[in-house]
Amino acid sequence: NAGVMQNPRHLVRRRGQEARLRCSPVKGHSHVYWYRQLPEEGLKFMVYLQKENIIDESGMPKERFSAEFPKEGPSILRIQQVVRGDSAAYFCASSQDRTYNEQFFGPGTRLTVL
Amino acid sequence: AQKITQTQPGMFVQEKEAVTLDCTYDTSDQSYGLFWYKQPSSGEMIFLIYQGSYDEQNATEGRYSLNFQKARKSANLVISASQLGDSAMYFCAMREGLGGTASKLTFGTGTRLQVML
């Protein structure tokens, strides 16, 4: 059974470029969560999606960040015009449904902005 | 106010000894869940243990147990018989409103545990 897959594991971008982070949830899971971890900090919630719907985006920055979880294919976290402050580890988690206790985390994507 | 507070930035423990990692939380919800995750140096997040607010017994998973004191709003993680492989960052997290729409986890700042020979 494959767990949550994230790719790429490491991503380097120059300021002003776009970053696309992909997340494939555990097979059968229809709920996806994105978290960001700045160096030496805990994880901060960004967005919660169910297939084709954004349920909670209260943690998403208002500009440059967007997320989607299409009917087919992985969830995508997109960061436009990256800045150095976007350098962080981005984790995706999935769960079977809203009330399921455990969120299974992927290995994370480490974004470095030069 | 912080929803999850971990007051120990770093802890040391001798191999084979037990260690307690502190976590206090703040919520006005009656229904919530508390989680502990381990993050080794490789970076992945590993689920350790879960405690629901209505669970009367403290959760246990192998060498991990959760000392849940609801009135004090604390959910400390106890690791028994520490091993070198336990050296990692440990995060406490909370999910509020289990019966409603809220699903996100709120994390503390973490405790770095170092197990010594």
Image (cartoon, helix red, strand yellow):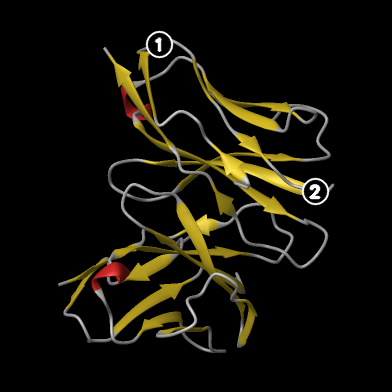
Residue with the mark numbered 2: B28
Pointer 2 or 1: first along the chain: 1
Quadrant where the image shows the C terminus of chain B? top left
Q: On the image, which quarter does residue B97 sit in?
A: bottom right
Residue B17, position as x, y percentages in the image = 43, 10
Residue at screen point 82% across, 49% down: B31
Q: Residues within 10 Å of mark 1 (few under 14, many from 20)?
A: some
Residue B34, position as x, y percentages in the image = 66, 42
Residue with the mark numbered 1: B16
Above or below, A85 against B76 in this view is below
Q: Please indicate whether residue B8 sits to the left or right of residue B55 in the image.
A: left
Circle 2 — which element? Answer: loop
Task: Give the amino acid type for the residue marked by disc 2 in the picture.
Answer: Ser
Residue at screen point 84% across, 39% down: B54
Is residue B42 visible from the viewing direction of this image? Answer: yes
Say which of B71 and B47 sits in front: B71
Circle 1 — which element? Answer: loop
Q: Please indicate whether residue B44 sits to the left or right of residue B57 in the image.
A: left
**Count of labels in the image:** 2
- Host chain of mark 2: B
Residue B55, position as x, y percentages in the image = 81, 36
